[in-house]
Image: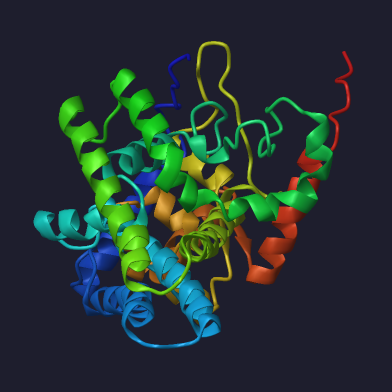
Amino acid sequence: MKTIHFRNIDKTKFLKTLNKRVNDYFKENNIKRTGNWKLYLKAIIMFTLYIVPFLLILTVDISIWVKLILTVIIGIGMAGVGMNVMHDANHESFSKRKWVNQLMGGSMYILAGNVYNWKVQHNVLHHTYTNIKNYDEDIDAGRIIRFSEHTKWLRIHKFQKYYSIFLYGLLTINWAITTDIKQMRSYLKRKLSYGKFPNPAAEWTKLVISKIIYYLIWIALPMAVLDIPWWGILIGFFIMHYTAGIILSVVFQLAHVVPSTEMPEPDESGNMEYTWAIHQLHTTANFAPKNKLVKFYTGGLNYQVEHHIFPHISHIHYDKLAQIVKKTASEFNLPYNEYKTMRRAIKEHFKQIAKLGEKPQPQLA
């Protein structure tokens, strides 16, 4: 693949102006950019949603239907930990203390993922090359779903507006089974890393051990403790992951695969039209900014514009930063993509999925 080059000179001075205003905000209010008691309380709530229902399933004599409900709650907690704790920590914004970020970032292992893979895939590829085909893996669903107008169209895509939502739920279970192995093989071969390149043998060892522990806890332990057939345990495991997968996938799609966002391509030399920061404005969208429940549960990921420009600032500040970013973008006549409600964002996403599923018309010379 060609090397991507974003425009180096911002003649409008957009980012310089925006950075000054954001820096002034933190300085004038005498607050730190990382998390505070609100984030720590949220972490406790999300871990409780994730762990307590599992303990109840293992230790309390309850009906199978209650167990199924608790399994769904575990999935909700799983997504909540990912969005509120793991995400901030692996962006090094959960705490000013490195060891706290490493500890909380390590929650990725109990979500069936791998920290090294996630940092490369998310911090490096997605945040750098947002919505650029073949570089941002978040818009690459293989052949089954067409997320970009630059992806080859197949007949099956005519029906993706019907089946895509059902495939979204497979996100985290793919982490648990195949994705981490494929990604680690690819990233280590390509010498990719977020920071210092790690020891490959150490990373493979960490992956294998973490997967074994994960399966022992979430599959072997319930099989040993519960009077439920093995296939019942696997169904519960699947429901947990499917719930989390649906939530995480939809939250991502609403921010990047909607009509208002662009899917730009580099020219033949790998040059992009905009600077990196302005590229983020063109490729990212916010949704439901006034919805307190959405803001609380999604870890501020409904403020994707702010998150993409300031990934090292904790999400608890995004609602305030949004006012600054929106005002500055308007002053510089730059886009600020935003859907007022989650319902509208979901509607627009599936409208975009339907459009991308249509057979492209030949370009006129």
Q: Is residue 293 left or right of residue 128?
A: right
Estimate the x, y position of residue 117 in percent, counting from the top left: 33, 38
Estimate the x, y position of residue 149 in percent, counting from the top left: 71, 33
Q: Residue at x 64, y 47 (%)?
A: 257
For the question of whether residue 20 can be seen, the reply is no
Number of marks in the rendered image: 0
Q: Residue at x 57, y 35 (%)?
A: 140
Residue toward you, 355 or 159: 159
For the question of whether residue 364 can be seen, the reply is yes
> What is the quadrant of residue 197 in the picture?
top left
> What is the quadrant of residue 198 in the picture?
top left
Q: Residue at x 66, y 39 (%)?
A: 147
Q: Residue at x 48, y 45 (%)?
A: 174
299 above or below 57? above
Estimate the x, y position of residue 298 in percent, counting from the top left: 46, 68
270 above or below 144? above
The quadrant of the picture occupied by the C terminus is top right
Q: Is residue 261 left or right of residue 224?
A: right
Residue toward you, 111 or 210: 210
Q: Is residue 34 left or right of residue 220?
A: left
Estimate the x, y position of residue 188 in percent, counting from the top left: 29, 24
Q: Is residue 183 left or right of residue 102?
A: right
> What is the quadrant of residue 193 in the picture?
top left
345 above or below 206? below
